[in-house]
Image (tube, rainbow, N blue to C red):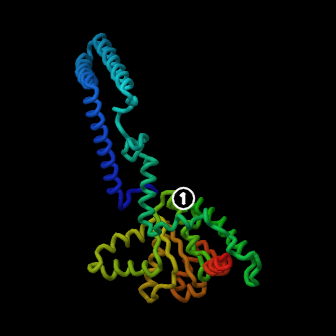
Amino acid sequence: MWKESSYAKDLKMEYEQLRFRNRQLLNERIAEVRHQLPRIAEIDDEIRDLSIDAALAHEEPVVQSQLSSHIHALIDEKYRILSQAGYPDDYLSAIYTCPICKDTGYVGQEPCTCLKQRLIKRQYLNSNLGPNLAQENFDTFCSDYYSNEPDGIHELTPRANIENIYQSLHQFIAGINAYFQGDASKKGNILFQGGTGVGKTFLSKCVAKELLELGYTVLYLPAGALFEQISDAVMNKQQFPNSQELYQTIQQCDILMIDDLGTEFTNQFTASSFYTLVNNRLLQRKSTVISTNLSLTELRQHYSERIFSRICDSYMIYTIYGEDIRFIRRRNWQTES
């Protein structure tokens, strides 16, 4: 999960700049204290000279002990002077924005919490989801928009159905790492299917936010933009040289979210590209989340039997039904007004 990413160099530069700024701040503090308290400068010089003498006296333990005692007495005097002048004890200590990793980003070989948070922030910026996740997440999920009355078509009421899906999605998120690690019992892909305005995109973004918070790379693209990017990368490499990086991200990101599948212009190229994308990501055990207004029958007609088969075998399929939530909100707003 915390692998080298396309923006690892940027993060490395961020940490270098952080260390540089903190060193500058420490140097400014040292200069300030030396100017205000000249005795501090004298003590620092004495400690430096005595430390050199102690190193040279490594074969004379008695001399080393005497020098060490003298150095500690000077350090005590230094802190006493600083305290009397109103400075905190650590004012001249090394400054770290993150004391855990000392602004390196790593604790041993493991990424520090601060690096994970920076990665998450960067992944948010690169996910294409923008600021919407502040409003569109599981915390703002509300099943009240779905009727609790049978619709005469489905076994469950719209509300019971969406609440089941809500619970299942939490299980999906909890099991996603097992899927990435090769657990054959886990399905790591989702198809949200249903009419306009029933909450497919909302639930996709709920899943996206949770996975971003866990540190996974997520890319969200409307279907039209997705196939346009693939076309530019495959068919128009010279005209759109920068398309290659996004194309690689489409292939390699942990979770790819395709919104409104079926609204793109469909031809042999898009159908073939879609199958290749779906199949390659399944083989690499990458996760794909798709939302579409198409029924399963229409999905088969739009693309191919091969795609339909791969999705039915490897995706968790959620059919969402109910009234268009936007109409419900508008109606409620008009009633309140």
Quadrant where the C terminus is found in the figure: bottom right
Q: Which residue is drawn at 42% across and 51% down?
A: 115
Q: In the image, is 3 to the left or to the right of 35? A: right
Q: Tell me where residue 201 sits by quadrant.
A: bottom right
Residue 206 at x, y = what percent? 56, 66
Q: Which residue is drawn at 33% across and 52% down?
A: 14
Q: In the image, is 111 to the left or to the right of 200? A: left
Q: Is residue 133 above or below residue 313?
A: above
Residue extending furthest toward the top: 62
Q: Tell me where residue 191 sits by quadrant.
A: bottom right
Q: What residue type is labelled 1?
A: Asn
**Residue 227 vs residue 98, the one in the foreground:** 98
Count of marks placed on residues: 1
**Residue 329 vs residue 13, the one in the foreground:** 329
Q: Is mark 1 on a helix, strand or loop?
A: helix
Residue 256 appears anywhere in the view: yes
Q: Is residue 125 above or below residue 313?
A: above
Q: How crowded is mark 1: few (under 14 residues within 10 Å), some or many (20 or more)?
A: some
Q: Which residue is drawn at 45% across and 72% down?
A: 280
Q: Is residue 131 above or below residue 94?
A: below
Q: Tell me where residue 59 sits by quadrant.
A: top left
**Residue 44 vs residue 206, the one in the foreground:** 44
Residue beneath label 1, please?
177
Residue 314 appears anywhere in the view: no
Q: Residue at x 74, y 82 (%)?
A: 151
Residue 300 at x, y = what percent? 56, 86
Residue 328 at x, y = what percent? 65, 79
Residue 180 at x, y = what percent? 51, 61
